[in-house]
Image (spheres, helix red, strand yellow):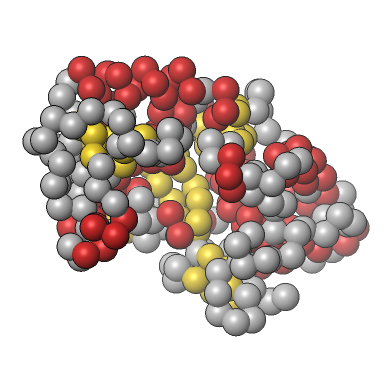
């Protein structure tokens, strides 16, 4: 990878405002892109309307701007990418790499929680059915640029996973791969909660014949109860006031150097110093770590 072609991204879903855990992912991906003299894109992953909070997407963009995390180019909205997803699904179908499945969650749970390929050769139609990838290129391990070689859960890696849901919505794994390829993303820096689906995403890249990006998974921040900071766990939104203390807190979480007189710096100067001092090798390899709230 050459510095001139580095393209990173931050891709939040608009299910609520950004919180400290979101800031860690946004800041880590931003610093990695800027330290590589690269491009940093923002994508709003608004493909699951039932989970979305009205106004959250605009709030997220305002929060990023307020915290000095300025992106390059236009924001990509997944809600405007349905045609690209349909084309990808059509191509997989033409190659014989997908099939319809009517199995319920209850049935899959009854056979152990991993789909067993029950509908693979039944030739079912689209009515009341999900569309699954016919898995021909399972990925059993991948290299993480922070954690080294990560070994997948083999039954999960070999599973024919859903790429278009029964309710008509496009599956996350399909949309993220199609969009990362479209945007030319060369490295994905994100939270360790997304380690598990990575092998599915790399597998999709291989089915499409595309070059997969590099991956770097950051540790997750925990609340006082030991649960991941998340919108579902009602993590508090980022403060609206001075952004610098939260940026410093996130830098400390990522084990990065803090300028001694950071209070005298503007947010832009603080981030510029963070870019200059960025050393991802210093990040703790644990998947989770307490956040000092």
Residue 117 in view, yes or no:
yes
Q: Residue furthest front?
A: 127
On-image quarter of the N terminus? top left
- x, y (%) of residue 58? 76, 37
Classify residue 202 as left or right of residue 256: left
Question: Which of these two is toward me, 234 or 67?
Answer: 234
- x, y (%) of residue 114? 22, 58
* Quadrant of residue 162 within the rendered picture: top left
Name the residue: 29% across, 48% down: 199
- x, y (%) of residue 159? 20, 49
Question: Which of these two is toward me, 143 or 129?
Answer: 129
Question: Which of these two is toward me, 17 or 31?
Answer: 17
172 w.r.t. 75: above or below: below
* Quadrant of residue 124 within the rendered picture: top left
119 w.r.t. 84: above or below: below
Name the residue: 72% across, 52% down: 17
Classify residue 251 as left or right of residue 244: left
Residue 137 in view, yes or no:
no
160 w.r.t. 283: above or below: above
On-image quarter of the C terminus? bottom right
Question: Which of these two is toward me, 94 or 207?
Answer: 94
Name the residue: 21% across, 53% down: 115
130 w.r.t. 89: above or below: below
Classify residue 211 as left or right of residue 170: left
- x, y (%) of residue 247? 74, 58
């Amino acid at each position: 990878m050459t510095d001139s072609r580095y393209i990173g991204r931050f891709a939040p879903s608009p299910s609520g405002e950004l919180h400290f855990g979101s800031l860690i992912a946004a800041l880590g991906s931003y610093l990695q892109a800027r330290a590589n003299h690269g491009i940093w894109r923002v994508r709003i992953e608004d493909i699951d309307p039932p989970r979305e909070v009205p106004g959250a997407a605009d709030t997220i963009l305002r929060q990023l701007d307020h915290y000095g995390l300025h992106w390059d180019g236009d924001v990509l909205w997944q809600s405007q990418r349905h045609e690209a997803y349909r084309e990808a699904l059509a191509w997989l179908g033409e190659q014989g790499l997908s099939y319809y499945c009517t199995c319920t969650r209850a049935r899959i749970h009854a056979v152990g929680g991993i789909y067993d390929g029950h509908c693979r050769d039944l030739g079912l139609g689209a009515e009341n059915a999900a569309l699954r990838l016919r898995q021909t290129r399972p990925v059993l391990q991948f290299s993480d640029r922070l954690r080294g070689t990560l070994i997948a859960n083999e039954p999960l890696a070999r599973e024919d996973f859903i790429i278009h849901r029964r309710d008509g919505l496009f599956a996350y794994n399909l949309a993220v791969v199609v969009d990362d390829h479209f945007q030319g993303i060369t490295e994905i820096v994100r939270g360790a909660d997304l380690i598990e689906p990575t092998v599915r995403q790399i597998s999709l890249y291989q089915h499409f014949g595309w070059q997969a990006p590099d991956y770097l998974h950051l540790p997750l921040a925990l609340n006082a109860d030991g649960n991941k900071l998340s919108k579902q766990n009602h993590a508090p939104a980022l403060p609206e006031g001075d952004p610098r203390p939260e940026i410093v807190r996130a830098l400390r979480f990522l084990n990065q150097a803090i300028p001694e007189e950071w209070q005298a710096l503007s947010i832009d100067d603080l981030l510029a110093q963070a870019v200059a001092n960025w050393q991802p090798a210093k990040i703790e390899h644990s998947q989770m770590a307490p956040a000092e709230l």
